[in-house]
């Protein structure tokens, strides 16, 4: 009986390691995820263009950590940036208002980006929940029993209403709702309008029933090249079924008009 239990435990450990997959990184450490390195290289690539104003969308802004990295890097590079932040969670949005309401060219939106505009339920486990999502999760030790009614919008509607001429970087960290947000771009999901798209893939995709295959199919059909983001570099990714491990990772879709970093 003891040997049988030991074998079962060994099988469970092996399965857990396989499920995590290779190159798994901690989502809370921007240096480990490669986001800092990517943003640095992204901004540097536009330095040679005089009087250039970059338009960046931070969807799922949370407390503004991603935006903070951008603003810090801008102190090094002589670039003009127009930042559009989207955060539906009330408590998180209040923090964004405190931090950024006085800043020029920074637009705060208490909205979730989605495939359909209107209202929706946001599921969370507490206030300031970094895993708050439109898709309820009750697994992986996550229990999201608090429901908040929020406002949603399609990105194509927002782009049209705000006369956005071009998006240089669209970042999507919206806990499983990334594919819906991309579909909400409508005709603007094209490599002539968007240079880079950073999207998250995690166990949130289990709740939304979306797969990496869906992202590859949608984005490659629109002439984007998909790369996986590592701590210090990007690697061009080709879809393989074993990539469907639902572990946290970031991918960068690059316009066909842009040379890969």
Image: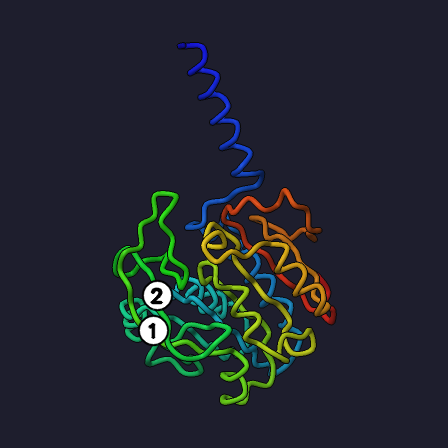
Q: How many marks?
A: 2
The quadrant the C terminus occupies is bottom right
Marks 2 and 1, Cα distance to the nearest angstrom?
7 Å
Q: Is residue 228 above or below residue 113?
A: above
Q: Label 2 belongs to which residue?
A: 122
- Residue 226, located in which quarter of the rendered image? bottom right
Residue under the image location 47 percent in, 50 percent down: 203
Element at badge 1? Answer: strand
**Between 80 and 5, which is closer to the camera in this rendering?**
5
Rate crowding at label 1 as few (under 14), some (14 to 19) or many (20 or more) other CA atoms within 10 Å. some
Element at badge 2? Answer: strand
Query: As drawn, which residue projects farthest toward the front?
Result: 1
Q: Label 1 belongs to which residue?
A: 150
Visible in this render: residue 261? Answer: no
Residue under the image location 50 percent in, 80 percent down: 82
- Residue 197, located in which quarter of the rendered image? bottom right
The quadrant the N terminus occupies is top left
Visible in this render: residue 211? Answer: yes
Q: Is residue 82 above or below residue 95?
A: below
**Between 103 and 125, which is closer to the camera in this rendering?**
125
Q: Earlier in the sequence, mark 2 or mark 1?
A: 2
Instruction: Kindly identify which numbered label has been placed on residue 2.
Output: none
Contact (Cβ within 8 Å) of mark 2 with mark 1: yes
**Between 32 and 132, which is closer to the camera in this rendering?**
132
């Amino acid at each position: 009986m003891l040997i049988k239990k030991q074998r079962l435990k060994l099988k469970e450990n092996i399965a857990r390691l396989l499920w995590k997959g290779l190159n798994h990184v901690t989502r809370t450490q921007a240096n480990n995820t490669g986001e800092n390195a990517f943003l640095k290289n992204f901004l540097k690539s536009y330095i040679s263009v005089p009087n250039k104003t970059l338009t960046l969308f931070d969807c799922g802004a949370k407390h503004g950590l991603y935006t903070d990295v951008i603003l810090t890097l801008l102190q090094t590079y002589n670039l003009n940036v127009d930042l559009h932040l989207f955060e539906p969670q009330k408590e998180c949005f209040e923090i964004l208002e405190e931090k950024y309401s006085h800043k020029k060219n920074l637009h705060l939106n208490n909205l979730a980006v989605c495939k359909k505009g209107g209202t929706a339920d946001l599921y969370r486990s507490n206030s300031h929940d970094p895993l708050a999502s439109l898709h309820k999760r009750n697994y992986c030790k996550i229990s999201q029993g608090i429901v908040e009614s929020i406002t949603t919008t399609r990105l194509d509607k927002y782009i049209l209403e705000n006369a956005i001429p071009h998006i240089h970087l669209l970042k999507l960290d919206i806990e499983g709702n990334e594919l819906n947000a991309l579909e909400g771009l409508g005709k603007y999901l094209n490599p002539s309008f968007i240079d880079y798209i950073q999207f998250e893939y995690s166990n949130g995709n289990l709740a939304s029933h979306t797969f990496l295959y869906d992202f590859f199919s949608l984005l490659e059909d629109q002439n984007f090249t998909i790369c996986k983001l590592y701590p210090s570099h990007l690697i061009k990714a080709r879809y393989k079924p074993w990539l469907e491990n639902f572990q946290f990772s970031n991918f960068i879709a690059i316009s066909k008009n842009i040379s890969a970093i």
